[in-house]
Image (spheres, rainbow, N blue to C red):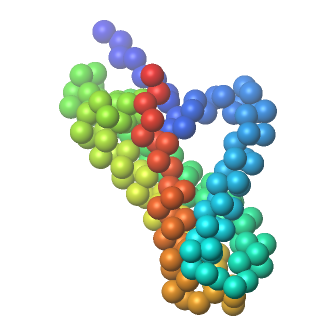
Amino acid sequence: MKKEVRLYNVLFPIWLLWIFPQVWLVLLPGNLLIDCLVLTGALFVLKCRSKWAVVRQLWWKFWLLGFLADFVGVLWMMLALSIVSNAEAHSWWYDSLSYAMHNPFGHPAAFLWTLAAVALAGYCIYRFDKRAMKNCVLLSEGEKRKIALSMAVITAPWLFFIPMY
């Protein structure tokens, strides 16, 4: 009996970006808008005086580094695919992690695997954004920590949990 391996991406099928490159025209500005809104919102909550100067200085760094952090999460999810493709059909690994790519709520191990991917991407967002703010003299160290934490929690790839079927 031949085992069937399906390749699912976290947000949507990765081939969609290759076959329909115009999807990038929606994905890129949408991600930029979310990152800028969260950054601006965090600056408003912190009552930062020079919020627009901070946004002008950091928006593009947060945007690009957010994609890099999401990619780290995608690599973690792809590791599940690698484990499943090398596991025997209907083994524990196959039955539990095969859900991670298309329905993280289908098995507790798949849920935990997906949660680890979101947490890893969120941690990377936090670290990358803190590093991006290293030379920003307009913010205190406490503000930098709070902004990085809010970016990590709010912009983590929570859409990894959306079932694909």
Residue visible at 65% across and 82% down in the picture: 48
Give the residue displayed 51% in from the left and 86% down from the top. 142
In the orientation shown, which residue stands out farthest toward the left? 92
Q: Is residue 80 visible?
A: yes
Seen in the picture, residue 60 relative to 91 is either above or below; the reply is below
- Foreground of the two, 151 or 90: 151
Looking at the figure, which quarter contains the N terminus? top left
Q: Is residue 156 above or below residue 129?
A: above
Query: Horizontal placement of 52 versus 116: left or right?
Result: right
Place residue 24 in its image quadrant. top right
Residue 42: horizontal and vertical position, in percent?
58, 71
Toward the top, the furthest residue is: 1
In this view of the protein, can residue 84 be seen by the observer?
no
Pick whichever, 4 or 117, lies toward us: 117
Q: Which residue appears at 61% of the width and 62% of the height?
A: 38
Drawn side of residue 98 relative to residue 64, left or right: left
Residue at the (45%, 22%) spot, across then down: 165
